[in-house]
């Protein structure tokens, strides 16, 4: 018997004029991992939200373990045995894991008083049953990205769900954390839990999935068994058009003068994210990459490079700007900046897509544009088309999917030439086609003479592009031998550097 069966599901959003899901069929068998893939905007997240009760379909039917159901909310879906783990955590950051697990289902003494001890014991029982090793008394806000993802899954299991829908679960995880998640998924699968796994990463799907369903333009294009698929074939299913072809990315012309430099920089008092004696230079016409696991100083390094934070010791030089810039001074006219926090730093969510593009480009617009003789929205549309941002210019940025938000930030920041480009996790949450488009744009800017610094929690984001690569561990920088770093999965030395070995 199937765990879940969707037939003829459609969903139209009148506010944006988008048919997100069009007559889609999907099924999941208990004890299997069924991957749901496609380009950004293909409809996979919308279909997942429909099966999880967060969206109501316009037409079609849903069966759970052979029984027809209609969900009015996600609580109805939970009661039917379906748990949803979103890309971005929905846990209460100030509560412990056990308190989050009990939230909305709090055990009571005498039917009145919250029984914290009983809640903790019940949480411990569930964690032990499913093989979790989390400290349930830890506040969620103090957890790593990986532990927070596990806590989300554990909370869903505490509701008694038998089907888990995981929406891009590795987006914020590094390779080691992702492998830990895969082991957890295998245990849940062996115990009979059915898992819908939404992703755009072919390697992950081949690693854990039994079947894969490909969506394109809101429609289900095909469903295949994973066992006999090759990575190149699967990649082409997800994004047609030669995504397996590897360009000679690491080659470039001669580098020029130093555009960006850190000299013996120290930043203390930020806990695990402090920096100690970091020196780094990026020259015109080259790409430099820095990788780090969470909690090793990468966020501090990003703030320092962006001019948001000033060093306590040492100096920062951007192009010909003076040393030790004041807060916010680093941007000016010298740099483009794709922040890792695209919602908090990269976008004004309640403003339109057009305004988000224009706001970052006002100093670069011509006089006719600013006076209204040329409609700024036309410029916005051109950039949206170039970077495949799927939305209307007048739509609010908060209505965009995660991938479209990332492309919107990239469209604004990479549209024009800047001497220095700071790109922090520039392709997070993007499918292979969108990743290649941004990589190609970065390479084009490099060839025009830009100095590009990529900061990432996933070294695969830059190893094939970078002229020089580094690892940041506990605030200290180590160089990666380019001759020994063809890719993160093929380079055990890199994994060792990321975790503090071979220094």
Image (tube, helix red, strand yellow):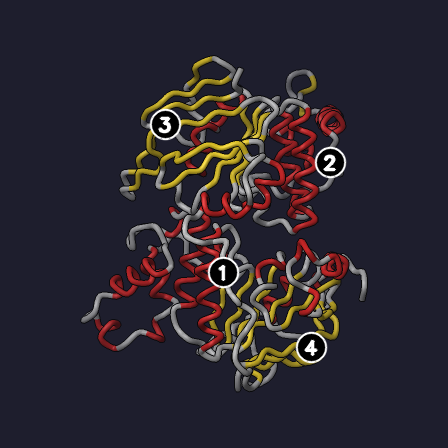
Q: Mark 1, residues whose alpha carbon is within 10 Å: few (<14), some, or many (≥20)?
A: few
- Tell me the SS state at disc 1: helix
Q: Which residue is mark 1?
A: 345
Spatial separation of the CA atoms under disc 4 and disc 1: 25 Å
Q: Quadrant of residue 12?
A: top left
Q: Which residue is mark 3?
A: 9
Ranked by sequence position, the earlier of labels 3 and 4 is 3
Q: Which residue is mark 4?
A: 279
Is 355 located above or below residue 67 in the figure?
below
Q: Mark 3, residues whose alpha carbon is within 10 Å: few (<14), some, or many (≥20)?
A: many
Ranked by sequence position, the earlier of labels 4 and 1 is 4
Spatial separation of the CA atoms under disc 1 and disc 2: 31 Å
- Tell me the SS state at disc 2: loop
Is 464 located above or below residue 241 in the figure?
below
Spatial separation of the CA atoms under disc 3 and disc 4: 55 Å
Ranked by sequence position, the earlier of labels 1 and 3 is 3
Ranked by sequence position, the earlier of labels 2 and 4 is 2
Between tags 2 and 4, which lies in front? 4
State left or right for residue 222 relative to residue 481. Answer: left
């Amino acid at each position: 018997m199937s765990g879940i069966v969707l037939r003829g599901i459609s969903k139209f959003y009148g506010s944006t004029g988008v048919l997100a899901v069009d007559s889609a069929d999907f099924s999941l068998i208990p004890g299997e991992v069924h991957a749901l893939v496609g380009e950004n905007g293909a409809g996979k997240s919308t279909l997942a939200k429909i099966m999880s009760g967060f969206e109501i379909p316009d037409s079609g039917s849903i069966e759970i373990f052979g029984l027809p159901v209609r969900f009015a909310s996600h609580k109805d879906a939970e009661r039917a045995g379906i748990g949803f783990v979103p890309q971005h955590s929905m846990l209460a950051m100030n509560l412990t894991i056990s308190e989050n697990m009990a939230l909305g289902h709090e055990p009571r003494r005498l039917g009145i008083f919250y029984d914290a001890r009983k809640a903790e014991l019940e949480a411990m029982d569930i964690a032990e049953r499913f093989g979790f090793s989390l400290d349930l008394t830890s506040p969620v806000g103090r957890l790593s990205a990986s532990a927070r993802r596990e806590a989300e899954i554990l909370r869903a299991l505490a509701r008694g769900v038998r089907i888990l829908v995981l929406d891009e679960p590795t987006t914020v995880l590094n390779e080691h954390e992702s492998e830990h998640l895969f082991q957890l998924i295998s245990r849940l699968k062996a115990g009979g839990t059915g898992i819908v796994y939404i992703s755009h990463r072919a390697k992950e799907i081949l690693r854990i999935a039994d079947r894969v369903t490909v969506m394109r333009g809101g429609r289900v294009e095909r469903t295949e068994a994973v066992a006999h698929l090759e990575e190149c074939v699967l990649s082409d299913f997800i994004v047609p058009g030669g995504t397996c072809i590897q360009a000679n990315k690491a080659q470039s012309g001669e580098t020029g003068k130093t555009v960006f430099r850190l000299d013996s920089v120290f930043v203390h008092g930020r806990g695990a994210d402090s920096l100690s004696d970091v020196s780094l230079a990026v020259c015109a016409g080259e790409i430099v990459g820095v990788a780090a696991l969470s909690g090793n100083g990468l966020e501090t390094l990003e703030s320092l490079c962006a001019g948001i934070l000033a060093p306590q010791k040492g100096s920062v030089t951007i192009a010909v700007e003076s040393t030790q810039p004041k807060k916010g001074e680093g941007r000016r006219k010298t740099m483009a900046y794709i922040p890792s926090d695209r919602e908090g730093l990269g976008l004004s969510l309640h403003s339109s897509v057009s305004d988000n593009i224009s706001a970052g480009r006002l100093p670069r617009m011509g006089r006719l544009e600013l006076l209204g003789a040329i409609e700024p929205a036309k410029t916005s549309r051109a950039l949206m088309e170039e970077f495949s941002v799927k939305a209307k210019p007048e739509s609010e940025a908060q209505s965009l999917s995660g991938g479209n938000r990332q492309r919107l930030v990239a469209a604004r920041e990479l549209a024009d030439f800047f001497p220095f480009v700071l790109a922090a996790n520039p392709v997070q949450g993007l499918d292979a086609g969108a990743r290649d488009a941004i990589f190609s744009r970065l390479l084009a800017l490099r060839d025009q003479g830009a100095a590009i610094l990529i900061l990432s929690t996933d070294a695969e984001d830059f190893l094939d592009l970078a002229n020089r690569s580094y690892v940041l561990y506990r605030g200290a920088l180590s160089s990666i031998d380019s001759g020994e770093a063809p890719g993160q999965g093929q380079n055990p030395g890199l994994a060792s550097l990321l975790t503090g070995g071979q220094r």
